[in-house]
Amino acid sequence: MKLIKKLRWQILIIVMALVVIAVVLWGQQAEPVLVEAPEPIGGGIFKEGIVGSLMRLNPLLAVFNPPDQDPASLLFSGLIQFDSTGLPQPDLSNSWGISRNGDVYNFSLRTDAFWHDGEPVSSADVVFTVNLLKDPDFPVPEDLATFWQEIEVEELDERTIQFRLPEAFAPFLSYLDFGILPAHHLNGLTAQEIVDAPFNLQPIGSGPFKFERLILTDSQILGVALEKNPDYYGEEVFFDQVEFHYFTDYTAVWEAYTAGEIQGIGEIAPEILEGALEDQSLNLYTSRLPQMTLVLLNLDNPKVPFFQDVEMRKALMQGINRQYLVDYVNQGQAIIADGPIFPKTWAYLEGLSRYEYNPEEAVEKIRDLGYSYPGEGGTTRTNEDGARLALTLVFPDDEHHTLIAQAIQENWTALGFNVILEALPYEELITDRLEKRDYEAALVDLNLTSMTDPDPYPFWHQTQTTGGQNYSMWNDRQASEYLEQARIILDIVDRGRLYKNFQVRFSDQIPALPLYYPVYTYGVSSNVKGVRIGPIFEPSDRLETITGWYFFVEVPGGLKPTEEETAGE
């Protein structure tokens, strides 16, 4: 008991000492200082280098010449735009409504949208542009022309447009992501006259930047300069000007960047990738492209009956070292693909099971199916009926696809397959082999550039096995029902559920072998701030957030920014 009393006195002394120390320290604390963050301000000229040459600054014609698409995307606005997940957002239109049965769409235009010459954007401009797409004499991709022929468009009033479809078609909104042209400048011209019109090199748009001048040397167009549109209805831009400079190859673009002539590189191609990775002054931004490289299997070809067995298809999938294809053949500029719907989009199923590279398990599956090496020796497995695991893989006749095909051949040979490679020009591969279903296995690229809606129907629905693009001849009723319903249901949540069910079915049946999604790498000087890009549906989408990019900052109150904050000046 006495011991406890003594300890109480010691504890009390310690506590009192701590209190005194705390009071002293509190008194020595400095008054809190409010530090205001630097804010971006306007100014400066952003210059970007692109490979190619300028032809026409017309959003409907730019599809034929990718170097035109970048400046056109800043000059013109669309009726709607799409975010990085593929969901529609307002642009020239501020709202839209859809009839209950999904075959009528009404759009209302915003009242603060003006052309660069000061005229208001009206319904007449939208109707004029759509009718141009419907004109058989105007050059647009054949499938797009066919689509618009079936759509009726009407100007209900100066600010309201109506589209009437022959039947419900949920992906319709994805077809409205095109630049609107000014009717008051082009009305009365024939389709061919519009193609050759001076307007295409002195355009009037409604976007965040307007045409300023062509950059010429000895009458040759080497670039185009755009200036800030002070009357733009959207977010005000920081750059005073944006210039696109055109070069003959990527090496020339790289040289221009290292010489300080440009601050942006439109694409970091393989030939300049190594230097770009080493340059500390260059920030790289990578985004998944709307493309997928895959191996199609002809499930209806009697020469390769083993393709009809889902376990064999899974073995073929597990037998491909896709990480090698990504890391070495593509220099890391790709993402392993697990299905036909692109990652980070609204319809993508996160957590979908992946077929990892596992040749040992693949061999077990093949053995369980009754295929083994002949007793007399050989490198090709056969079954008890003498049927051999032999196939021919056709592929595009270029260096890149040759490396992929050779890697797959090596992987499958190790499983006991006899793989013959056949290189063909891409056009011949499509028209003479895929469209005629005259192939066994085919290495191809599925390109869905500009298609913001996933809609896998054309490639995997059972009705498309004849005359369509279901080249694998996958005749699966369950998967087809998911795709049918997703085309007519308007609710995005219900559509997403159907597409996720489809992805599960695709992964389970594996009618084709997804390899990877290629990625797009964009380079911008570290002096440029605020740059961000998400998944893109075409390369020009990298510029979608350019209104938020800037060079300069200031601190409220007149204080100077830190050295780090002034790095972009």
Image (cartoon, helix red, strand yellow):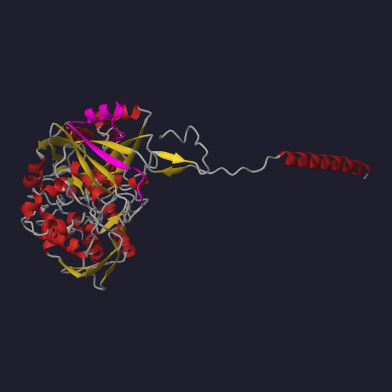
Residue sitting at 28 percent across and 41 percent down? 242
Q: Picture coordinates of residue 215 (x, y %)?
A: 20, 36
Asked if the stretch drawn in magenta spans residue 398, the answer is: no
Picture mark count: 0
Q: Is residue 42 left or right of residue 142?
A: right
- Residue 130 visible here: yes
Asked if the stretch drawn in magenta spans residue 257, the answer is: yes
Q: Residue extending furthest front?
A: 118
Q: Picture coordinates of residue 382 (x, y %)?
A: 17, 40
Q: Is residue 549 above or below residue 191?
A: above
Occupied quadrant, residue 255: top left
- Residue 315 visible here: no
User: Which image quarter holds the N terminus?
Assistant: top right
Q: Picture coordinates of residue 210 (x, y %)?
A: 25, 48
Residue closer to the observer: 228 or 293: 228
For the record, the magenta segment spans 236-264
